[in-house]
Amino acid sequence: MQNHLNALYTWYLAHARDLPWRRQTDPYAVWISEVILQQTRVNQGLAYYYAFLERFPTVEALAAADEQAVLKAWEGLGYYSRARNLQAAARQLMAAYGGVFPRSWAQLVTLKGVGPYTARAIAAFAFGERTAVLDGNVFRVLARLWADDTPIDSARARAHFQPLADELVAHAPDPALHNNAVMELGATLCTVHNPACLYCPLAAACRAHALRNPAAYPVKGKRRESKERHFAFYLWQTPQGVAWVQRSAGFWKGLYVLPHLELPEPPAEPPLLQEQHVFTHFRMHLHVYKGVPAQVPPDLYWIKPGEWDNYPLPKAMHKVLGGLQARNLLV
DNA sequence: GAACCGTGGTA
DNA sequence: TTACCAAGGTT
């Protein structure tokens, strides 16, 4: 196996993408990049990586920042709890570690928003700890390598694959190089669809390839039944312009929902939903899963006209506002 | 432990 | 078009 792994490292050094977070070992930059890349493709996260480090260059800066500013920097990326957790963790780091990253994944995993993958990634990439990262790419590569039919989305998947992954990194000359190489392989050659086995440095060792059936791996459990969910938002016409009142508070919490903001002049009582005041409302279609429909809390909030840009808004909101603007419905 | 969280790309 | 998927983590 070691010969094959050496072939993998050689391949990586020759063919890997040149990505900015791979060019340094600053734990802060590694951390930010790993969180940005959670469930997010490189091309989507790249610009955010540069901008976020520019805007919040250090743990101290991030810890001291206004939460709305952090969310604003995250605007459009999705999974906004990542941004809130980043700042929470930055404050944890200041309080518990004097702003200096602990070096072991076991300590890192106690940080908010830092799970088993990200903790090991920081430990390996920033501090050279000999530990194996386990993400979607690694799951796929390992499952194919050994034709392992353990469902990778099962509860026991991580417990099953982590020791196997750790065994691979055990004798690697460079843990960071090893982890990067396995992930790069999964991201560029050992892909979900149409894997490029012809060019794969591990093909000679790969059980799934020997079986001529890489598509059979990794095994995944039953997909959840998907169901449509509707969210209603309401727009009010006011003498000053358009005030946006939204329901289903708690969804996208903190993003454009106002409880986290200081309202200059909060209305004494929110306007009642009266049909003649509602001039438009829209539905959002989200991919949602089988289960209870969204609860719509009674709380109503509003944003003053002309202040849209000050708020971090999800992409879906921007699209709606853009449409309204085009129709001259926003003052 | 299952359900939940966003967005953009792909077949 | 629909469904799936991507450097996961939290509740």
Image: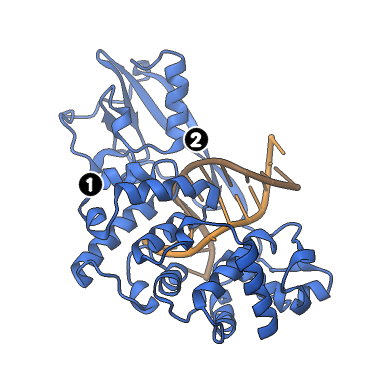
Chain colours: A blue, B brown, C orange
Q: What residue type is labelled 2?
A: Met
Q: Which class describes the residues within 10 Å of circle 2: few (<14), some (14-19), or many (20+)?
A: some
Q: In which quarter of the image is residue A11?
A: bottom right
| Residue A185 as seen in the image, left or right of residue A274 | right
Q: Which amino acid does label 1 sit on?
A: Asp
x and y, in percent, of residue A158 in the image: 54, 75
Residue beneath the point at 58% across and 65% down? A136
In the image, residue A233 above or below residue A209: above
Which SS class for mark 2? strand
Quarter of the image containing the N terminus of chain A? bottom right
Near-viewer residue (A126 or A193):
A126
Q: Can residue A215 be seen in this view?
A: no
Residue beneath the point at 68% across and 76% down? A7
Q: Which class describes the residues within 10 Å of circle 1: few (<14), some (14-19), or many (20+)?
A: few
Residue beneath the point at 23% across and 29% down? A270
Q: Mark 2 lies on which chain?
A: A
- Pointer 1 and pointer 2 on the same chain: yes
Point out the residue furthest to the front here. A14
x and y, in percent, of residue A181 in the image: 59, 69
| Residue A265 as seen in the image, left or right of residue A248 | left
> Can you identify the residue that label 1 sits on?
A66
Q: Distance between the Cα atoms at labels 1 and 2?
A: 29 Å
> Can you identify the residue that label 2 sits on?
A284
Q: Quadrant of residue A116?
A: bottom left
In the image, residue A48 above or below residue A110: above
Near-viewer residue (A202 or A65):
A202
Residue beneath the point at 46% across and 61% down? A23
| Residue A305 as seen in the image, left or right of residue A147 | left
Which mark is first along the chain, 2 or 1? 1
Near-viewer residue (A306 or A194):
A194
x and y, in percent, of residue A22 in the image: 48, 62
